[in-house]
Image (cartoon, rainbow, N blue to C red):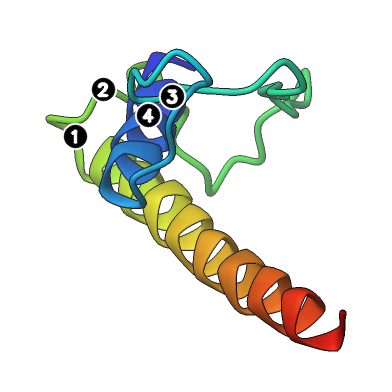
Amino acid sequence: VITVTEAKAAALADLHVYCKNGLVATGTTTDAVAIGATQSVKSSMTPIEYTGLATAFGEQLAKTVYQALIEAGERNRVFQRNQANLH
């Protein structure tokens, strides 16, 4: 959860998203992180016990979250510009 939250905050900072008070936004009131997990592990799977940024899984998780938010932010900016041009 921390790894995802940090990646989200980094993406918002890089997108230059600010709060009304002028500070860099680190999230929104609708942010949420959901973790899906099963209670059993298939014999061919190795359980992942730690997913910090120093692990391969954690690094890939952070990169994925960051890139998804950057793409969503850029798409939102294009949408907002198009909406403004319609009016």
Mark 2–mark 4 distance (CA, rounded to whole Å):
16 Å
Q: Would you identify the image quadrant in which residue 29 lies? A: top right
Give the percent coordinates (x, y) of residue 74.
Answer: 51, 70
What residue is pinned by disc 2? 52
Q: SS of the residue at dot 3?
A: loop
Q: Earlier in the sequence, mark 3 or mark 2?
A: 3
Mark 4–mark 3 distance (CA, rounded to whole Å):
7 Å
Q: Given the current orientation, which residue lies at the most extreme left position?
A: 54
Give the percent coordinates (x, y) of residue 9.
Answer: 37, 29
Q: Nearer the viewer, mark 4 or mark 3?
A: 3
Mark 3–mark 2 distance (CA, rounded to whole Å):
23 Å
Q: SS of the residue at dot 1?
A: loop
Name the residue at 36% across, 52% down. Answer: 15
Mark 1–mark 2 distance (CA, rounded to whole Å):
6 Å
Q: Earlier in the sequence, mark 1 or mark 3?
A: 3
Q: Amino acid at mark 2?
A: Gly
What residue is pinned by disc 4? 9
Q: Which mark is residue 55?
A: 1
Q: Amino acid at mark 3?
A: Ala
Q: Earlier in the sequence, mark 4 or mark 3?
A: 4
Q: Amino acid at mark 4?
A: Ala
Name the residue at 53% across, 49% down. Answer: 44
What residue is pinned by disc 3? 25
Mark 1–mark 3 distance (CA, rounded to whole Å):
27 Å
